[in-house]
Image: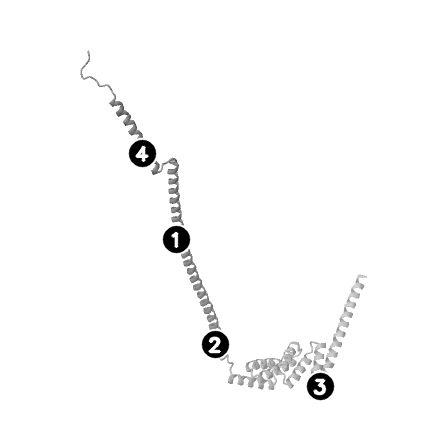
Amino acid sequence: MKHLKNIWIVLFTVSIAFAQNKEAEKIKQESNRYTYKGNQALQEDSFSDAEAEYRKAISKDAENATAKYNLGNAYYTNESYAEAFNRYKQATKVALTKEEKHSAYHNMGNIFMKNKEYEKAVVAYKNALRNNPKDDETRYNLALAKDMLEKNPPKDDENKEDKDKKDQKKEDENKKDQDDKKDNKDKNEDEGDKEKDKGGKDDKDKDGEGDKEKEKNKKDDKNDKENADQKDDKKQQQQAKPNQLSPQQIKSLLQAMNNAEKKTQDKLNEKKGKAIKVKAEKDW
């Protein structure tokens, strides 16, 4: 039973592969039919119809190298060289035979020659000859491309000189920008320093004015203190002599005292006049 099961698996796998191959073959046949229609339209100089049929063929089978190559020929005939080059390049990637690759590289070389890109044309013709060394037309085109390349060498030096000039110009512009930024920075710093100095001077002036104001306030405080002290002394003096007499009162008082003293003296003198006289000798 195990042996029979393995046989069934093999048969199922084969049937799937057969179905897939049949489907792939069907797709290729449909793609080839579109290619054939495109070839007929191209022979009839109907570029739009040819382009449409080739595109259908490529859409059905992306590996259809013939459709891509023939579409490139259609673009080449219509002088759409950029599109033609792209189709030839695609054909070289999917081509199954050396002859197909040879033809695609050969036509790529022709486009480079038309664009006067002789160095690239030499490379393309060499690739064509690697796939078909016996093709005399490709040999002739290669010799022509080499001759044109020798007479028209790549302008690397000129391009380099132009590039150097552009680089130098760019460098000068960058340097100028940096210098301008530096100058602006220095200018801003100078203005900032001036402003700072001005602010410092203003502060100093303000400090000077403040010192003067402080000194004035100090003097005022001192004067106020002296005045206060004088007032206190006067007040203390007034407090120490609360009953201090006026000059008129003092004069009246002195006069009264003199009068009293005179009266006293007069009384004493009066008593002396009435006193008993004492004898000069002793009375035994």
Instruction: Please name the amino acid that badge 3 sits on.
Output: Ala
Q: Residue furthest bottom?
A: 44
Alpha-carbon span between mark 1 and mark 3? 109 Å
Amino acid bearing label 2: Lys
On residue 212, the disc is: 1
> Please, what secondary structure does the residue beneath circle 4 have?
helix
Q: Earlier in the sequence, mark 4 or mark 1?
A: 1
Disc with the residue nearer the chain's start (3 vs 2): 3
Q: Which mark is residue 165?
A: 2
Q: Judging from the image, what secondary structure is the residue with disc 3 in?
A: helix
Where is mark 4, residue-wise? 255
Instruction: Name the colouring of the figure.
Output: one colour
Q: Residue at x 48, y 72 (%)?
A: 173
Q: Residues within 10 Å of mark 1 (few under 14, many from 20)?
A: few
As measured in the structure, the alpha-carbon distance from the residue carrying label 4 to the one carrying label 1 is 60 Å
Give left or right: position of 26 versus 219: right
Q: Report the amino acid beneath label 1.
A: Lys
Which residue is painted at 39% across and 53% down in the image? Answer: 212
Task: Answer with the quarter of the image where residue 283 lies.
Answer: top left
Q: CA distance from mark 3 to mark 4?
A: 166 Å
> Most extreme residue toward the top, as rendered?
284
Frontmost of labels 1 and 2 is 1
Mark 4–mark 2 distance (CA, rounded to whole Å): 128 Å
10 Å crowding of disc 2: few (<14), some (14-19), many (20+): few
Across and down, in percent, residue 136 comes to: 60, 86
Asked if the residue under mark 2 is in contact with the one under mark 4, i.e. CB atoms within 8 Å, the reply is no
Question: Where on the picture, by quarter, is residue 25?
Answer: bottom right
Residue 166 x/y as whole percent: 49, 76
Horizontal and vertical percent position of residue 113: 57, 84
The residue labelled by disc 3 is 41
